[in-house]
Image (tube, rainbow, N blue to C red):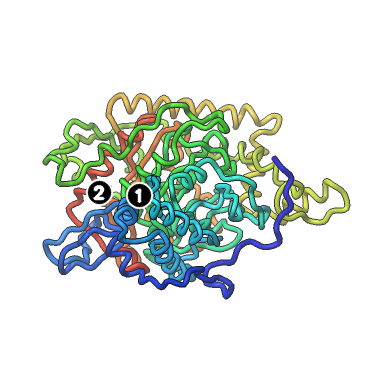
Amino acid sequence: MAMLHSRPTWVRKVGSPGYVIQHSQVFDASNLRIVLHSNLGSGCREVHRSATPSKSVSQCSEGAQQRPVSVIRKIRESLVRREKSAVEVTEAYLVKLREQEPHVRSFLHVSEKALQDAQELDRRVAEGREIGPLAGVPLGVKDNLCTRDMPSTGGSRILQGYYPPYDATAVAKLRSSGAILVGKTNMDEFGMGSSTEGSAYQVTANPWDLSRVPGGSSGGSAAAVAAGQCAGALGSDTGGSIRQPASFCGVVGLKPSYGRVSRFGLMAYASSLDVVGCFGNSVMDAAILLEAIAGADKNDSTCSPQDVPDYTSNLLPIDDLGSKPLAGIRFGIISETIADGVVEDVLSAVKQAVTHLESLGASVREVAMPNFSLGLPAYYVLATSEASSNLARYDGVRYGPRAHGEEVMSMYANSRALGFGPEVKRRILMGTYALSAGYYDAFYKKAQQVRTVIQQDFKNALEEVDLLISPVTPTAAYKIGEKVNDPLAMYVGDLMTVNVNLAGLPALVVPCGLAKGGTSGLPVGLQMIGPAFREESILRPGHIFEQTLPTSFSAPTLVS
Protein backbone atom coordinates (compact mmCIF):
# COMPACT_ATOMS: atom_id res chain seq x y z
CA MET A 1 0.00 0.00 0.00
CA ALA A 2 1.41 3.38 -0.98
CA MET A 3 2.07 5.88 1.80
CA LEU A 4 -0.33 8.78 1.45
CA HIS A 5 -0.66 12.11 3.20
CA SER A 6 -4.25 12.99 4.04
CA ARG A 7 -5.71 16.00 2.31
CA PRO A 8 -6.82 18.66 4.80
CA THR A 9 -10.45 18.78 3.59
CA TRP A 10 -12.96 16.53 1.93
CA VAL A 11 -15.38 17.71 -0.71
CA ARG A 12 -18.12 20.23 -0.23
CA LYS A 13 -21.33 18.81 1.17
CA VAL A 14 -24.72 19.18 -0.40
CA GLY A 15 -26.49 22.29 0.79
CA SER A 16 -23.28 24.01 1.87
CA PRO A 17 -22.56 27.48 0.48
CA GLY A 18 -19.70 26.13 -1.65
CA TYR A 19 -21.73 23.52 -3.51
CA VAL A 20 -22.81 24.54 -7.01
CA ILE A 21 -24.42 22.54 -9.81
CA GLN A 22 -21.72 22.97 -12.45
CA HIS A 23 -23.93 23.26 -15.51
CA SER A 24 -25.93 26.21 -16.70
CA GLN A 25 -28.80 24.31 -18.31
CA VAL A 26 -31.93 24.33 -16.16
CA PHE A 27 -33.89 21.07 -16.03
CA ASP A 28 -37.14 20.38 -14.27
CA ALA A 29 -36.73 17.24 -12.15
CA SER A 30 -40.46 16.60 -12.27
CA ASN A 31 -40.22 16.02 -16.02
CA LEU A 32 -37.56 13.38 -15.49
CA ARG A 33 -39.84 11.43 -13.17
CA ILE A 34 -42.32 11.02 -16.02
CA VAL A 35 -39.57 9.40 -18.08
CA LEU A 36 -38.22 7.29 -15.26
CA HIS A 37 -41.53 5.82 -14.17
CA SER A 38 -44.17 3.93 -16.05
CA ASN A 39 -47.49 5.55 -16.86
CA LEU A 40 -49.70 4.85 -13.89
CA GLY A 41 -53.02 5.66 -15.45
CA SER A 42 -55.41 8.47 -14.75
CA GLY A 43 -56.32 9.20 -11.18
CA CYS A 44 -53.11 7.71 -9.77
CA ARG A 45 -50.56 9.88 -8.05
CA GLU A 46 -47.00 9.18 -9.18
CA VAL A 47 -44.88 7.56 -6.52
CA HIS A 48 -41.32 6.30 -6.30
CA ARG A 49 -41.77 2.80 -4.94
CA SER A 50 -44.55 0.29 -4.39
CA ALA A 51 -45.10 -2.88 -2.37
CA THR A 52 -47.79 -4.58 -0.29
CA PRO A 53 -49.19 -3.13 2.93
CA SER A 54 -50.97 -5.00 5.68
CA LYS A 55 -53.99 -2.99 4.59
CA SER A 56 -54.20 -1.10 1.34
CA VAL A 57 -53.11 2.49 1.67
CA SER A 58 -52.81 3.05 -2.06
CA GLN A 59 -52.81 6.60 -3.34
CA CYS A 60 -54.34 5.39 -6.62
CA SER A 61 -57.94 5.62 -7.64
CA GLU A 62 -59.94 2.41 -7.59
CA GLY A 63 -58.87 0.00 -10.31
CA ALA A 64 -55.45 1.58 -10.93
CA GLN A 65 -52.44 -0.63 -10.22
CA GLN A 66 -48.82 0.38 -9.92
CA ARG A 67 -45.91 -2.00 -10.48
CA PRO A 68 -42.28 -1.42 -9.55
CA VAL A 69 -40.41 -0.39 -12.67
CA SER A 70 -36.75 -0.61 -13.62
CA VAL A 71 -35.55 2.94 -13.19
CA ILE A 72 -32.13 1.89 -14.52
CA ARG A 73 -33.53 0.56 -17.79
CA LYS A 74 -35.72 3.60 -18.31
CA ILE A 75 -32.77 5.96 -17.84
CA ARG A 76 -30.62 4.06 -20.31
CA GLU A 77 -33.45 3.79 -22.84
CA SER A 78 -34.10 7.54 -22.58
CA LEU A 79 -30.44 8.14 -23.47
CA VAL A 80 -30.42 5.70 -26.36
CA ARG A 81 -33.60 7.25 -27.81
CA ARG A 82 -32.15 10.75 -27.26
CA GLU A 83 -35.17 11.71 -25.14
CA LYS A 84 -32.91 12.86 -22.32
CA SER A 85 -29.21 13.55 -22.05
CA ALA A 86 -26.99 12.14 -19.32
CA VAL A 87 -26.42 15.69 -18.10
CA GLU A 88 -30.16 16.30 -17.76
CA VAL A 89 -30.66 13.06 -15.84
CA THR A 90 -27.69 13.73 -13.57
CA GLU A 91 -28.73 17.32 -12.90
CA ALA A 92 -32.23 16.19 -11.99
CA TYR A 93 -30.92 13.71 -9.46
CA LEU A 94 -28.46 16.24 -8.03
CA VAL A 95 -31.26 18.75 -7.60
CA LYS A 96 -33.34 16.11 -5.81
CA LEU A 97 -30.32 15.15 -3.72
CA ARG A 98 -29.80 18.76 -2.68
CA GLU A 99 -33.45 19.21 -1.79
CA GLN A 100 -33.65 16.06 0.33
CA GLU A 101 -30.23 16.02 1.93
CA PRO A 102 -30.88 18.45 4.80
CA HIS A 103 -33.70 16.13 5.90
CA VAL A 104 -32.34 12.66 5.09
CA ARG A 105 -28.56 13.14 5.44
CA SER A 106 -27.80 10.13 3.24
CA PHE A 107 -24.53 11.39 1.76
CA LEU A 108 -21.18 12.13 3.34
CA HIS A 109 -19.61 13.36 0.11
CA VAL A 110 -21.00 14.50 -3.24
CA SER A 111 -19.00 14.05 -6.41
CA GLU A 112 -17.69 17.15 -8.12
CA LYS A 113 -17.15 15.12 -11.30
CA ALA A 114 -20.66 13.75 -11.81
CA LEU A 115 -21.69 16.32 -14.41
CA GLN A 116 -18.30 16.10 -16.10
CA ASP A 117 -18.72 12.32 -16.41
CA ALA A 118 -22.24 12.84 -17.74
CA GLN A 119 -20.97 15.26 -20.39
CA GLU A 120 -18.40 12.72 -21.53
CA LEU A 121 -21.11 10.07 -21.79
CA ASP A 122 -23.26 12.43 -23.88
CA ARG A 123 -20.35 12.84 -26.27
CA ARG A 124 -20.13 9.07 -26.66
CA VAL A 125 -23.84 8.88 -27.39
CA ALA A 126 -23.63 11.72 -29.91
CA GLU A 127 -20.75 9.95 -31.69
CA GLY A 128 -22.78 6.75 -31.90
CA ARG A 129 -20.30 4.84 -29.74
CA GLU A 130 -21.30 1.85 -27.65
CA ILE A 131 -22.50 2.60 -24.12
CA GLY A 132 -22.65 0.29 -21.13
CA PRO A 133 -25.67 -1.27 -19.39
CA LEU A 134 -25.58 1.41 -16.67
CA ALA A 135 -25.05 4.34 -19.03
CA GLY A 136 -26.17 7.59 -17.43
CA VAL A 137 -27.50 5.96 -14.27
CA PRO A 138 -26.78 8.06 -11.14
CA LEU A 139 -25.62 5.75 -8.35
CA GLY A 140 -24.47 6.13 -4.75
CA VAL A 141 -21.56 4.20 -3.25
CA LYS A 142 -21.22 3.23 0.41
CA ASP A 143 -18.33 5.06 2.03
CA ASN A 144 -16.36 1.89 2.83
CA LEU A 145 -15.73 1.25 -0.88
CA CYS A 146 -12.64 2.98 -2.22
CA THR A 147 -13.12 5.71 -4.82
CA ARG A 148 -10.08 7.39 -6.33
CA ASP A 149 -11.79 10.76 -6.87
CA MET A 150 -13.77 11.02 -3.63
CA PRO A 151 -12.86 10.66 0.04
CA SER A 152 -13.40 7.21 1.50
CA THR A 153 -13.70 7.35 5.27
CA GLY A 154 -15.66 4.24 6.21
CA GLY A 155 -17.76 6.55 8.38
CA SER A 156 -14.79 6.96 10.73
CA ARG A 157 -12.77 9.92 11.99
CA ILE A 158 -9.64 7.82 11.74
CA LEU A 159 -9.88 8.04 7.93
CA GLN A 160 -11.03 11.65 7.76
CA GLY A 161 -9.83 13.19 4.50
CA TYR A 162 -8.43 9.93 3.08
CA TYR A 163 -8.37 9.71 -0.71
CA PRO A 164 -7.56 6.19 -1.96
CA PRO A 165 -5.22 5.92 -4.96
CA TYR A 166 -7.54 3.43 -6.68
CA ASP A 167 -11.15 2.35 -7.13
CA ALA A 168 -12.59 -0.74 -5.51
CA THR A 169 -13.22 -3.41 -8.15
CA ALA A 170 -17.00 -3.06 -7.79
CA VAL A 171 -16.70 0.71 -8.26
CA ALA A 172 -14.43 0.32 -11.27
CA LYS A 173 -16.97 -2.03 -12.85
CA LEU A 174 -19.75 0.51 -12.32
CA ARG A 175 -17.67 3.17 -14.05
CA SER A 176 -16.83 0.87 -16.97
CA SER A 177 -20.56 0.13 -17.33
CA GLY A 178 -21.27 3.83 -17.79
CA ALA A 179 -22.70 4.67 -14.35
CA ILE A 180 -22.50 8.21 -12.98
CA LEU A 181 -21.33 8.12 -9.36
CA VAL A 182 -23.01 10.98 -7.51
CA GLY A 183 -21.47 10.51 -4.08
CA LYS A 184 -20.53 8.45 -1.03
CA THR A 185 -23.28 7.39 1.33
CA ASN A 186 -23.34 7.49 5.11
CA MET A 187 -22.78 4.35 7.18
CA ASP A 188 -22.08 3.07 10.66
CA GLU A 189 -18.35 3.31 11.33
CA PHE A 190 -16.57 0.47 9.48
CA GLY A 191 -19.92 -1.28 9.11
CA MET A 192 -20.36 -1.80 12.84
CA GLY A 193 -23.95 -0.84 13.58
CA SER A 194 -27.55 -1.19 12.51
CA SER A 195 -28.84 2.37 12.33
CA THR A 196 -26.13 4.81 11.04
CA GLU A 197 -26.04 6.16 14.60
CA GLY A 198 -22.54 4.70 14.69
CA SER A 199 -21.33 7.07 11.98
CA ALA A 200 -18.71 9.55 13.14
CA TYR A 201 -20.30 12.31 11.06
CA GLN A 202 -24.10 12.25 11.02
CA VAL A 203 -27.20 10.11 11.52
CA THR A 204 -29.26 9.33 8.44
CA ALA A 205 -33.05 9.55 8.69
CA ASN A 206 -35.57 7.12 7.23
CA PRO A 207 -37.48 8.78 4.34
CA TRP A 208 -40.68 7.08 5.54
CA ASP A 209 -40.43 8.78 8.93
CA LEU A 210 -37.61 11.23 9.59
CA SER A 211 -37.69 10.44 13.30
CA ARG A 212 -36.69 6.82 12.63
CA VAL A 213 -33.49 5.06 11.62
CA PRO A 214 -32.96 3.79 8.05
CA GLY A 215 -31.16 0.68 9.29
CA GLY A 216 -27.48 -0.05 8.93
CA SER A 217 -24.76 -0.22 8.38
CA SER A 218 -25.66 0.61 4.74
CA GLY A 219 -28.43 2.96 5.87
CA GLY A 220 -27.21 5.87 3.77
CA SER A 221 -27.44 3.85 0.55
CA ALA A 222 -30.90 2.50 1.34
CA ALA A 223 -32.27 5.91 2.34
CA ALA A 224 -30.78 7.56 -0.76
CA VAL A 225 -32.57 5.09 -3.05
CA ALA A 226 -35.83 5.35 -1.10
CA ALA A 227 -35.70 9.16 -1.22
CA GLY A 228 -34.99 9.21 -4.96
CA GLN A 229 -31.56 10.80 -4.50
CA CYS A 230 -30.01 8.19 -6.78
CA ALA A 231 -31.30 5.41 -9.02
CA GLY A 232 -29.47 2.67 -7.13
CA ALA A 233 -26.57 2.22 -4.74
CA LEU A 234 -23.85 -0.13 -3.59
CA GLY A 235 -23.65 -1.36 -0.03
CA SER A 236 -21.87 -4.05 1.91
CA ASP A 237 -23.32 -6.84 4.03
CA THR A 238 -21.42 -8.53 6.87
CA GLY A 239 -24.39 -9.67 8.95
CA GLY A 240 -27.41 -8.01 7.35
CA SER A 241 -26.14 -4.53 6.52
CA ILE A 242 -27.89 -4.48 3.13
CA ARG A 243 -30.99 -6.49 3.96
CA GLN A 244 -32.04 -4.74 7.17
CA PRO A 245 -31.86 -1.20 5.67
CA ALA A 246 -33.68 -2.43 2.55
CA SER A 247 -36.50 -3.69 4.76
CA PHE A 248 -36.61 -0.52 6.87
CA CYS A 249 -36.62 1.80 3.84
CA GLY A 250 -38.92 -0.20 1.54
CA VAL A 251 -36.44 -0.85 -1.28
CA VAL A 252 -34.97 -3.99 -2.82
CA GLY A 253 -31.70 -5.20 -1.29
CA LEU A 254 -29.50 -7.97 -2.66
CA LYS A 255 -26.73 -9.76 -0.77
CA PRO A 256 -24.84 -11.99 -3.21
CA SER A 257 -23.09 -15.24 -2.35
CA TYR A 258 -19.73 -14.86 -0.63
CA GLY A 259 -17.17 -14.68 -3.43
CA ARG A 260 -19.59 -13.63 -6.17
CA VAL A 261 -18.40 -9.98 -6.05
CA SER A 262 -14.81 -8.92 -5.46
CA ARG A 263 -13.98 -7.43 -2.06
CA PHE A 264 -10.90 -5.64 -3.40
CA GLY A 265 -11.15 -2.04 -2.27
CA LEU A 266 -13.79 -2.79 0.38
CA MET A 267 -12.61 -1.71 3.83
CA ALA A 268 -12.47 -4.97 5.75
CA TYR A 269 -14.64 -5.51 8.81
CA ALA A 270 -14.86 -9.31 8.96
CA SER A 271 -13.15 -10.71 5.87
CA SER A 272 -14.84 -14.12 5.90
CA LEU A 273 -18.29 -12.53 6.07
CA ASP A 274 -18.09 -9.25 4.11
CA VAL A 275 -19.97 -9.10 0.80
CA VAL A 276 -20.52 -6.21 -1.63
CA GLY A 277 -24.15 -5.95 -2.76
CA CYS A 278 -26.69 -3.45 -4.04
CA PHE A 279 -29.96 -1.57 -3.57
CA GLY A 280 -32.56 -0.81 -6.24
CA ASN A 281 -36.11 0.35 -6.80
CA SER A 282 -37.02 -3.04 -8.23
CA VAL A 283 -35.67 -6.58 -8.45
CA MET A 284 -34.78 -5.87 -12.07
CA ASP A 285 -32.58 -2.96 -10.99
CA ALA A 286 -30.86 -5.12 -8.36
CA ALA A 287 -30.24 -7.82 -10.98
CA ILE A 288 -28.75 -5.31 -13.43
CA LEU A 289 -26.43 -3.93 -10.76
CA LEU A 290 -25.32 -7.39 -9.63
CA GLU A 291 -24.54 -8.44 -13.18
CA ALA A 292 -22.40 -5.32 -13.58
CA ILE A 293 -20.27 -5.83 -10.45
CA ALA A 294 -20.04 -9.65 -10.23
CA GLY A 295 -17.24 -11.81 -11.59
CA ALA A 296 -13.69 -12.98 -11.05
CA ASP A 297 -10.97 -10.59 -9.89
CA LYS A 298 -7.27 -11.35 -9.77
CA ASN A 299 -6.92 -8.87 -6.90
CA ASP A 300 -9.18 -10.94 -4.62
CA SER A 301 -8.26 -14.58 -4.13
CA THR A 302 -11.61 -15.26 -2.44
CA CYS A 303 -13.56 -14.09 -5.50
CA SER A 304 -15.05 -16.99 -7.44
CA PRO A 305 -13.99 -17.61 -11.06
CA GLN A 306 -17.48 -18.93 -11.89
CA ASP A 307 -19.17 -17.39 -14.89
CA VAL A 308 -21.73 -14.67 -14.20
CA PRO A 309 -25.19 -15.59 -15.56
CA ASP A 310 -27.54 -13.22 -17.35
CA TYR A 311 -29.59 -12.37 -14.28
CA THR A 312 -32.23 -10.36 -16.16
CA SER A 313 -33.11 -12.83 -18.91
CA ASN A 314 -35.76 -14.63 -16.82
CA LEU A 315 -37.28 -11.48 -15.31
CA LEU A 316 -40.24 -11.30 -17.66
CA PRO A 317 -42.90 -8.58 -17.88
CA ILE A 318 -46.05 -9.32 -15.94
CA ASP A 319 -48.03 -9.71 -19.18
CA ASP A 320 -45.78 -12.62 -20.17
CA LEU A 321 -46.35 -14.53 -16.94
CA GLY A 322 -48.86 -17.33 -16.65
CA SER A 323 -51.52 -17.53 -13.98
CA LYS A 324 -49.28 -19.68 -11.77
CA PRO A 325 -45.74 -18.47 -12.57
CA LEU A 326 -44.24 -19.97 -9.39
CA ALA A 327 -45.79 -23.41 -9.84
CA GLY A 328 -43.42 -26.15 -8.73
CA ILE A 329 -41.23 -23.93 -6.54
CA ARG A 330 -41.03 -25.08 -2.93
CA PHE A 331 -40.56 -22.39 -0.28
CA GLY A 332 -39.68 -23.09 3.32
CA ILE A 333 -40.36 -20.47 5.95
CA ILE A 334 -37.84 -20.82 8.77
CA SER A 335 -39.84 -21.71 11.88
CA GLU A 336 -37.44 -20.02 14.27
CA THR A 337 -37.95 -16.64 12.55
CA ILE A 338 -41.70 -16.49 13.13
CA ALA A 339 -41.62 -17.39 16.82
CA ASP A 340 -41.86 -15.18 19.91
CA GLY A 341 -40.09 -11.84 19.68
CA VAL A 342 -41.37 -10.84 16.24
CA VAL A 343 -43.94 -8.03 16.39
CA GLU A 344 -47.45 -8.77 15.14
CA ASP A 345 -47.34 -6.28 12.24
CA VAL A 346 -44.22 -7.92 10.82
CA LEU A 347 -45.71 -11.41 11.20
CA SER A 348 -48.92 -10.26 9.52
CA ALA A 349 -47.06 -8.85 6.53
CA VAL A 350 -45.00 -12.03 6.14
CA LYS A 351 -48.09 -14.24 6.42
CA GLN A 352 -49.77 -12.21 3.67
CA ALA A 353 -46.63 -12.63 1.58
CA VAL A 354 -46.85 -16.40 2.08
CA THR A 355 -50.48 -16.34 0.97
CA HIS A 356 -49.50 -14.40 -2.14
CA LEU A 357 -46.71 -16.87 -2.99
CA GLU A 358 -49.21 -19.71 -2.71
CA SER A 359 -51.64 -17.87 -4.98
CA LEU A 360 -48.86 -17.80 -7.60
CA GLY A 361 -48.58 -21.60 -7.52
CA ALA A 362 -45.73 -22.02 -5.04
CA SER A 363 -45.90 -24.42 -2.13
CA VAL A 364 -44.90 -23.05 1.29
CA ARG A 365 -44.25 -24.99 4.46
CA GLU A 366 -42.37 -24.43 7.69
CA VAL A 367 -38.80 -25.69 7.91
CA ALA A 368 -37.11 -26.15 11.27
CA MET A 369 -33.49 -25.10 11.75
CA PRO A 370 -32.85 -26.13 15.35
CA ASN A 371 -29.46 -24.43 15.61
CA PHE A 372 -30.64 -21.12 14.14
CA SER A 373 -30.45 -19.22 17.44
CA LEU A 374 -26.78 -20.19 17.85
CA GLY A 375 -25.83 -18.14 14.81
CA LEU A 376 -26.08 -14.74 16.50
CA PRO A 377 -23.55 -15.32 19.32
CA ALA A 378 -21.25 -17.22 16.93
CA TYR A 379 -21.42 -14.35 14.45
CA TYR A 380 -20.47 -11.74 17.02
CA VAL A 381 -17.51 -13.79 18.22
CA LEU A 382 -16.21 -14.35 14.68
CA ALA A 383 -16.94 -10.87 13.35
CA THR A 384 -15.38 -9.04 16.29
CA SER A 385 -12.36 -11.35 16.25
CA GLU A 386 -11.70 -10.60 12.59
CA ALA A 387 -12.36 -6.90 13.17
CA SER A 388 -9.78 -6.72 15.94
CA SER A 389 -7.20 -7.96 13.44
CA ASN A 390 -8.38 -5.99 10.40
CA LEU A 391 -8.56 -2.67 12.20
CA ALA A 392 -5.03 -2.96 13.58
CA ARG A 393 -3.83 -1.22 10.40
CA TYR A 394 -5.38 2.07 11.48
CA ASP A 395 -2.67 3.50 13.70
CA GLY A 396 -2.18 7.10 12.56
CA VAL A 397 0.85 6.21 10.43
CA ARG A 398 -0.52 4.96 7.12
CA TYR A 399 -3.97 6.51 6.91
CA GLY A 400 -5.90 9.50 8.16
CA PRO A 401 -5.13 12.00 10.93
CA ARG A 402 -2.33 11.40 13.39
CA ALA A 403 -2.53 12.31 17.06
CA HIS A 404 0.46 13.65 18.96
CA GLY A 405 2.44 11.28 21.13
CA GLU A 406 5.71 11.55 23.01
CA GLU A 407 6.82 8.24 21.50
CA VAL A 408 5.50 5.80 18.91
CA MET A 409 3.31 3.68 21.17
CA SER A 410 1.55 6.69 22.67
CA MET A 411 1.06 8.08 19.15
CA TYR A 412 -0.60 4.80 18.12
CA ALA A 413 -2.80 4.78 21.23
CA ASN A 414 -3.79 8.44 20.96
CA SER A 415 -4.59 8.17 17.23
CA ARG A 416 -6.83 5.15 17.77
CA ALA A 417 -8.47 6.60 20.89
CA LEU A 418 -9.42 9.78 19.03
CA GLY A 419 -10.14 8.16 15.68
CA PHE A 420 -12.38 5.23 16.64
CA GLY A 421 -15.93 5.59 17.94
CA PRO A 422 -17.36 3.73 20.95
CA GLU A 423 -18.93 0.83 19.00
CA VAL A 424 -15.72 0.13 17.10
CA LYS A 425 -13.72 0.18 20.32
CA ARG A 426 -16.25 -2.15 21.92
CA ARG A 427 -15.96 -4.69 19.10
CA ILE A 428 -12.17 -4.51 18.98
CA LEU A 429 -12.05 -5.27 22.69
CA MET A 430 -14.54 -8.14 22.32
CA GLY A 431 -12.58 -9.64 19.45
CA THR A 432 -9.21 -9.26 21.14
CA TYR A 433 -10.58 -10.98 24.22
CA ALA A 434 -12.00 -13.87 22.17
CA LEU A 435 -8.63 -14.42 20.50
CA SER A 436 -6.53 -14.12 23.64
CA ALA A 437 -4.60 -17.02 25.11
CA GLY A 438 -6.80 -19.21 27.26
CA TYR A 439 -10.02 -18.08 25.58
CA TYR A 440 -9.37 -18.94 21.92
CA ASP A 441 -10.71 -22.49 22.22
CA ALA A 442 -13.62 -21.46 24.42
CA PHE A 443 -14.84 -18.70 22.10
CA TYR A 444 -13.32 -18.44 18.63
CA LYS A 445 -12.85 -22.15 17.97
CA LYS A 446 -16.31 -22.98 19.29
CA ALA A 447 -17.85 -20.23 17.14
CA GLN A 448 -16.21 -21.72 14.06
CA GLN A 449 -17.68 -25.09 14.97
CA VAL A 450 -21.12 -23.51 15.28
CA ARG A 451 -20.60 -21.92 11.88
CA THR A 452 -20.10 -25.37 10.37
CA VAL A 453 -23.30 -26.58 12.04
CA ILE A 454 -25.22 -23.58 10.65
CA GLN A 455 -23.89 -24.27 7.16
CA GLN A 456 -25.00 -27.88 7.41
CA ASP A 457 -28.46 -26.83 8.61
CA PHE A 458 -28.88 -24.62 5.55
CA LYS A 459 -27.65 -27.41 3.29
CA ASN A 460 -30.18 -29.81 4.77
CA ALA A 461 -33.01 -27.28 4.56
CA LEU A 462 -32.27 -26.44 0.91
CA GLU A 463 -32.43 -30.13 0.07
CA GLU A 464 -36.01 -30.21 1.38
CA VAL A 465 -37.13 -26.99 -0.34
CA ASP A 466 -35.92 -24.81 -3.20
CA LEU A 467 -35.80 -21.50 -1.34
CA LEU A 468 -36.04 -20.32 2.26
CA ILE A 469 -37.99 -17.27 3.37
CA SER A 470 -38.20 -15.29 6.59
CA PRO A 471 -38.81 -11.84 7.98
CA VAL A 472 -35.72 -9.62 7.79
CA THR A 473 -35.96 -8.14 11.27
CA PRO A 474 -38.22 -8.65 14.29
CA THR A 475 -39.56 -5.08 14.02
CA ALA A 476 -39.98 -2.26 11.54
CA ALA A 477 -37.75 0.82 11.75
CA TYR A 478 -37.40 2.13 15.29
CA LYS A 479 -36.92 5.66 16.58
CA ILE A 480 -33.55 7.39 16.34
CA GLY A 481 -31.91 7.09 19.76
CA GLU A 482 -34.20 4.28 20.91
CA LYS A 483 -31.47 1.63 21.07
CA VAL A 484 -28.27 3.63 20.86
CA ASN A 485 -27.49 3.04 24.55
CA ASP A 486 -28.45 -0.64 24.46
CA PRO A 487 -26.06 -2.39 22.06
CA LEU A 488 -27.33 -5.85 22.97
CA ALA A 489 -30.86 -4.91 21.89
CA MET A 490 -29.43 -3.68 18.60
CA TYR A 491 -27.43 -6.90 18.13
CA VAL A 492 -30.60 -9.01 18.56
CA GLY A 493 -32.05 -7.26 15.51
CA ASP A 494 -29.53 -9.20 13.39
CA LEU A 495 -30.94 -12.59 14.43
CA MET A 496 -32.58 -13.34 11.08
CA THR A 497 -29.75 -12.17 8.84
CA VAL A 498 -26.38 -13.20 10.31
CA ASN A 499 -26.82 -16.91 9.63
CA VAL A 500 -26.94 -16.25 5.89
CA ASN A 501 -23.49 -14.64 6.10
CA LEU A 502 -22.14 -17.52 8.16
CA ALA A 503 -23.29 -19.88 5.41
CA GLY A 504 -22.16 -17.62 2.54
CA LEU A 505 -25.53 -17.82 0.76
CA PRO A 506 -27.31 -15.22 -1.43
CA ALA A 507 -30.37 -13.43 -0.08
CA LEU A 508 -32.86 -10.99 -1.55
CA VAL A 509 -35.15 -8.60 0.33
CA VAL A 510 -38.35 -7.35 -1.31
CA PRO A 511 -40.94 -5.09 0.35
CA CYS A 512 -43.99 -7.11 1.34
CA GLY A 513 -46.12 -4.94 3.59
CA LEU A 514 -46.49 -2.13 6.09
CA ALA A 515 -46.35 -2.03 9.85
CA LYS A 516 -47.96 0.68 11.94
CA GLY A 517 -45.99 3.85 12.40
CA GLY A 518 -45.20 7.15 10.74
CA THR A 519 -47.84 8.93 8.68
CA SER A 520 -48.31 6.22 6.04
CA GLY A 521 -46.93 3.09 7.70
CA LEU A 522 -43.44 1.60 7.91
CA PRO A 523 -42.10 -0.89 5.33
CA VAL A 524 -41.62 -4.57 6.09
CA GLY A 525 -39.39 -6.76 3.93
CA LEU A 526 -39.47 -10.45 3.02
CA GLN A 527 -36.11 -12.26 2.86
CA MET A 528 -35.57 -14.96 0.21
CA ILE A 529 -32.52 -17.21 0.62
CA GLY A 530 -31.14 -19.50 -2.09
CA PRO A 531 -28.28 -21.91 -2.72
CA ALA A 532 -24.74 -20.57 -3.08
CA PHE A 533 -24.00 -18.92 -6.45
CA ARG A 534 -27.62 -19.33 -7.53
CA GLU A 535 -28.68 -15.71 -7.29
CA GLU A 536 -30.96 -16.23 -10.28
CA SER A 537 -32.99 -18.68 -8.17
CA ILE A 538 -34.10 -15.87 -5.85
CA LEU A 539 -34.21 -13.03 -8.38
CA ARG A 540 -36.92 -14.59 -10.56
CA PRO A 541 -39.34 -15.39 -7.70
CA GLY A 542 -38.60 -11.99 -6.15
CA HIS A 543 -39.40 -10.28 -9.45
CA ILE A 544 -42.64 -12.20 -9.89
CA PHE A 545 -43.60 -11.52 -6.27
CA GLU A 546 -43.21 -7.75 -6.54
CA GLN A 547 -44.81 -7.53 -9.98
CA THR A 548 -47.94 -9.43 -8.95
CA LEU A 549 -48.68 -7.90 -5.56
CA PRO A 550 -52.43 -7.32 -5.31
CA THR A 551 -52.13 -3.91 -3.65
CA SER A 552 -49.72 -1.00 -3.64
CA PHE A 553 -48.81 1.73 -1.20
CA SER A 554 -47.59 5.28 -1.39
CA ALA A 555 -44.05 6.53 -1.60
CA PRO A 556 -42.22 7.65 1.54
CA THR A 557 -43.73 10.80 3.00
CA LEU A 558 -40.60 12.77 2.15
CA VAL A 559 -40.84 11.79 -1.53
CA SER A 560 -44.59 12.10 -2.00
Label 1 – label 2 distance at C-alpha: 10 Å
**1 and 2 marks in contact (CB < 8 Å):** yes
Residue 404 in sight: yes
Amino acid bearing label 2: Glu
Q: Quadrant of the N terminus?
A: top right
Earlier sequence position, callout 1 versus callout 2: 1
Q: Residue at x 41, y 34 (%)?
A: 372
Task: State whether residue 450 is above or below residue 392.
Answer: above
How many numbered callouts? 2
Q: On the rendered structure, is 296 left or right of 459?
A: right
Task: State whether residue 48 is above or below residue 385.
Answer: below
Packing grade of label 1 (10 A; few <14, some 14-19, many >=20) is many
Amino acid bearing label 1: Val
Label placed on residue 252: 1
Please provide percent x and percent y for residue 46: 25, 66
Give the residue furthest to the front.
Answer: 127
Task: State whether residue 227 is above or below residue 432.
Answer: below
